[in-house]
Image: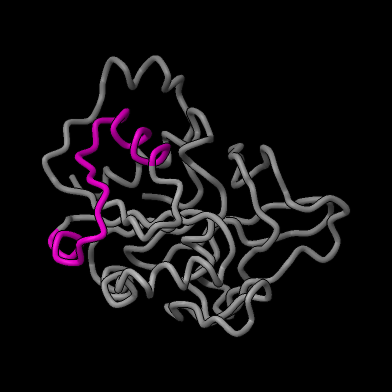
């Protein structure tokens, strides 16, 4: 997997002809607050063997983990803790298996957020989640650029990592530059929604599962 992306073919045509056949298992974490259906459909479209689950044992035994999230930082963290999934998410993110965080699933990897300052994040990375300061229209909704590709965004907050070395994608919205993609070792996390981003999003998911081959 690369951060900077690759030229995107017409995947809507090519993927239908050449879907990937995957024998390795991907766990799509269900903690009660994720955009699961669209993410699941996108992975199935490109041929991935993916299962929606909140079973820690299944997640631990899987070959890769996908961690989506929508809604408020604090509510997502409460749902994770109420479903007893905090430990396995942290363990998976720190393991050697590929791990993909999407939208709020990226944000809660950090220590805290302005949206819910009293609700602690997973603290996998040092840093916080802040609200747009310069943008005239919030939330940021629509297509925007990341490393020369267009992806679909829906958010009002973004991550501010202490370690700038993990940043591998930035995006400008209304004159405010923010981190839209991070990567460290096995872990990739994105602020946008690859499952809603057409061919470019499918290419990113395809790159992710190629790490399993």
Q: Is residue 41 in the magenta section?
A: yes
Q: How many marks?
A: 0
Residue located farthest toward the front when viewing the structure as drawn = 82
Q: Residue at x 64, y 63 (%)?
A: 158
* Residue 136 as seen in the image, left or right of residue 76: right
Q: Is residue 177 in the magenta section?
A: no
Point out the stretch of residues depicted in magenta.
37-61
**Residue in the foreground of this view, choosing between 43 and 183:** 43
* Residue 19 as seen in the image, left or right of residue 57: right
Relative to 197, say whether 32 is above or below. Answer: below
* Residue 25 as seen in the image, left or right of residue 42: left
Residue 26 in picture, x, y percent from top left: 22, 49
Residue 57 in picture, x, y percent from top left: 14, 65
Q: Residue at x 20, y 66 (%)?
A: 56
Color encoding of the figure: one colour
Q: Residue at x 46, y 58 (%)?
A: 189
Q: Residue at x 54, y 66 (%)?
A: 107
In the figure, residue 47 lies in which quadrant?
top left
Magenta region, mostly helix, strand or loop?
helix
Relative to 94, say whether 101 is above or below. Answer: above
Q: Quick one: quadrant of the C terminus?
A: top left
In the figure, residue 113 lies in which quadrant?
bottom right
**Residue in the foreground of this view, choosing between 53 and 202:** 53
Relative to 12, say whether 213 is above or below. Answer: below
Residue 74 in picture, x, y percent from top left: 55, 72
Relative to 124, say whether 193 is above or below. Answer: above
Residue 13 in picture, x, y percent from top left: 39, 14
């Amino acid at each position: 997997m690369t951060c900077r992306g690759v030229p995107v073919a017409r995947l809507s045509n090519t993927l239908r002809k050449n879907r990937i056949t995957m024998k390795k298992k991907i766990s799509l974490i269900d903690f009660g607050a994720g955009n699961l259906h669209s993410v699941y459909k996108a992975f199935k479209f490109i041929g991935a063997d993916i299962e929606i689950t909140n079973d820690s044992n299944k997640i631990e035994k899987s070959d890769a983990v996908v961690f989506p999230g929508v809604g408020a930082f604090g509510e997502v963290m409460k749902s994770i803790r109420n479903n007893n999934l905090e430990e396995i998410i942290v363990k998976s993110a720190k393991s050697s298996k590929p791990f993909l965080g999407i939208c709020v699933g990226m944000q809660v990897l950090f220590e805290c957020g302005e949206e819910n300052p009293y609700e602690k994040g997973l603290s996998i990375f040092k840093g916080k989640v802040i609200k747009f300061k310069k943008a005239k229209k919030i939330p940021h909704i629509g297509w925007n650029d990341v490393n020369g590709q267009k992806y679909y965004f829906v958010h009002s907050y973004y991550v501010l990592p202490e370690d700038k070395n993990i940043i591998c994608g930035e995006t400008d919205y209304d004159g405010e530059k923010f981190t839209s993609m991070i990567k460290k070792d096995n872990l990739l996390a994105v602020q946008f929604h690859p499952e809603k981003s057409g061919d470019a999003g499918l290419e990113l998911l395809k790159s992710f599962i190629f790490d399993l081959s």
